[in-house]
Amino acid sequence: MPEVSLLEVKNARDLERFVRFPMELYKNNKNYVPPLINEEKNVWDPSQNPALAYSDTKKYLALKSGKVVGRIALIINRKEEKELGISKVRFGWLDFVDDPEVSEALINAAKDFAREHQIKKIEGPMGFTNLDKSGMLTMGFDKLATMIGLYNFEYYPQHLENLGLVKEKEWVEFEMNFPTVLSEKVDRFSTLIAEKYNLKVVGFKNKKEILPYIDPMFRLLDQTYNTLSTYTPITEEQKQTYREKYFPYIDANYVICVTDENDELISFAVTMPSYSKALQKSKGKLWPFGWWHFLQAGKKNDRANFYLIGIHPEYQRRGVTAIIFKEIFIRFSKMGIKFAETNPELEENKSVQLLWQDYNPVNHKRRRTYSLTLD
């Protein structure tokens, strides 16, 4: 049997192989959703990804007989280390064929990188920051992936567990059949809460009108999630990056903002039509025809994804979600949305999970990061 060798990715040719490997690995899998190739390359361009300025990184390809059989990226987020006192090697972009020698070689690379930097812990799969894709799928392998969720074969978790890695964090995701009739409870309660706290829904005619609310949304995200142990504040550079990356996909009809009597943003929800099938059809490219699939997905779609939701801490237990869901119901009904899927939520984040309780949510996916403490 040929041995596994690791090749550090240092040039454009190898980066191309690094980015395209999962597309080859999953080419016959109906549930895998490829990323856009250029966006994946931009992750490793310092002019495009501000997180590279405060991170140490390495990328490897695993080879057998000259053929790519795996990949891994290794990251030390120095900002996380400085602000939270968390010292660990993050590993991500982890993909491999069903061969224990390959997965072992990749994890050994993470361990060696940690030892090289006198770090005792590795954890992954995860990206640079909290807003990057995280978590290895452990349930829901038969479900279509989303644009912001990682997908992997069922053998992945077993490989990591066989190598001694253990569960670190767990995320849950939910799917809902969107109701055809708004419940009387939500309708009545949303009106009551809006009147009690002088709240109102902001309507947007186009994307340009959303722009003044983007920075307040990011501030609200910080306020919503900063109590979670793993959360680090979003930098100005990151805000700009995510604005440029995701704003083109936003439809004004799918963005709901709620303001108080002083016109201050106190809650928002960003949803999008599902672009999963559009990404599959585009095969990682917007040109020459990928843009057409995205355009069609935005116009005709019966499935939507929740991407971001923020609620000011002062309003988190005051029923504001009823206002948001009433507005979502009105808009989704007009657009023919029948199914909705949440983004990954930390298992212990019960306050967010309670948002869906009136819609008979089904936990259809689970994912986790795995960690290992080194001797």
Image: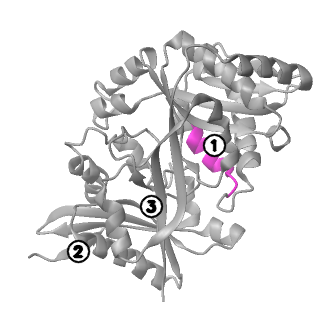
Q: What residue would you read off at disc 2?
A: 101
Report which residue position mark 3 lands on.
Answer: 125
Earlier sequence position, callout 1 versus callout 3: 3
Tell me where residue 59 appears, x and y as whole percent. 37, 66
User: Between disc 3 and disc 2, whose residue precedes?
Assistant: 2
Nearest the camera: 367 or 55? 367
Amino acid type assigned to the residue bearing label 2 in the image = Glu
Q: Name the residue tied to disc 1.
A: 353
Rounded to the nearest angstrom, the CA distance separating label 1 from label 2 is 39 Å
Nearest to the observer: residue 212 or residue 197? 197
Give me the residue at 48% from left, 89% from top.
375
Residue 169: image x %, image y %?
55, 62
Q: Is residue 70 above or below residue 281?
A: below
Residue type (three-letter) at the residue carrying disc 3: Pro
Q: Is residue 356 magenta?
A: no
Residue 261 visible? The answer is no
CA gap between label 3 and label 2 equals 19 Å
